[in-house]
Amino acid sequence: MIGRLIAFIFMSCLLLAGNANAQGKAELQWFAQSAFRLTTNGGKVIMIDPWIMENPKTPVELKDLDKLGKVDLILVTHAHRDHLGDAVAIAKKNNAPVWGPAGMNQTLTALGVLPAELAPRMNKSGRIEPFPGVKITQVHAEHSSELLLKDPVTGKDTTYVGGEPVGYIIQLENGFKIYDMGDTGLFGDMKMIGEYYKPDLLLIPIGGHFVMDPKDAAFATKLVNPKMAFPMHYGTNPYLTGTPAEYKAAMGQTPIQIVDMNPGDKKTF
């Protein structure tokens, strides 16, 4: 009887160890601006707003889309070039769907930029579960979303409908939640989003002019009240003058951990 009990405990420990190994740590790599490579606990790779090749702050050694490895899914918050970026090229290389604002994806499909299966449509409050245990929800963002593409006939830049901007709540296999705000200004429902989804990590723009400046971003962070906050979308053009130092100063004394990274850096969760 004792021998069977010991054997049962031993096998249970092996199973627990196997489950722990099957779900490793999540990893977030920053390519500057709002571009990220997120590897989930289960090993799925999600590119977010992948503006890489023309991003002036992305390290040169990262400007090779083939070196990204396998990409399983792409999230785009809105249609501006510094967010849609290289999403189309990455989607075609990996046969990976681009999830974004419904209007943006409708235009990409209508113009033949992407086939319908690589540009699925969803909208705010829409939720997908693309991989077991991973849930992605679109939420509100306060911005614009024009889609600028070259007209194939005239060769001129032409503006098309890009839908409405969005943010994303990304819940990983272990329950860890990331709130990517995308490009946004302040709005009161940030507090509601924080209270309802309870994000662990906030990805928040701080550059100013087109998005929140550090003071606004600090106020927004306190509305959302995450465990950690990552300042992004700054320093890539002369208008985006906000800095992480200004953001930290505006945050003051806070229990919220400010994640400090340079382009190319990785952080595990």
Image (cartoon, helix red, strand yellow):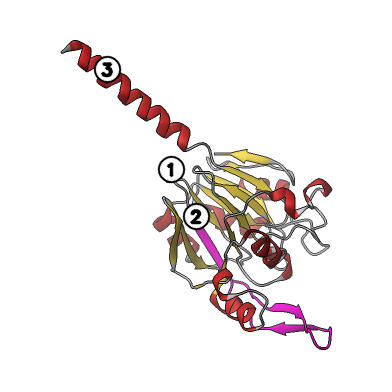
Dot 2 amino acid type = Ile
- Nearer to the camera, 116 or 172: 116
Q: Which mark is residue 234?
A: none
Relative to 140, is 13 on the left or the right?
A: left
Relative to 237, is 35 on the left or the right?
A: left
Dot 3 amino acid type = Ala
Relative to 149, is 229 on the left or the right?
A: left
How far across and how far down the image is residue 24, in percent?
A: 51, 36
Residue pointed to by mark 1:
174
- Element at label 1: loop
Residue under the image location 62 percent in, 72 percent down: 143
154 part of magenta stretch:
yes
Residue pointed to by mark 2:
170
Q: CA distance from mark 2 to mark 1?
A: 11 Å
Quadrant for the N terminus, please: top left
Residue under the image location 75 percent in, 78 percent down: 149
How far across and how far down the image is residue 83, in percent?
A: 68, 65
**Disc 1 residue crowd, few under 14, some 14–19, many 20+, Cα 10 Å:** some
Residue pointed to by mark 3:
7
Above or below, comparing residue 240 to residue 10 in the picture: below
Q: CA distance from mark 3 to mark 1?
A: 28 Å
**Magenta region:** 142-170
Above or below, comparing residue 136 to residue 107 in the picture: above
Mark nearer the viewer, 3 or 2: 3
Marks 3 and 1, the one that precedes in the sequence: 3
How far across and how far down the image is residue 202, in percent?
A: 55, 51
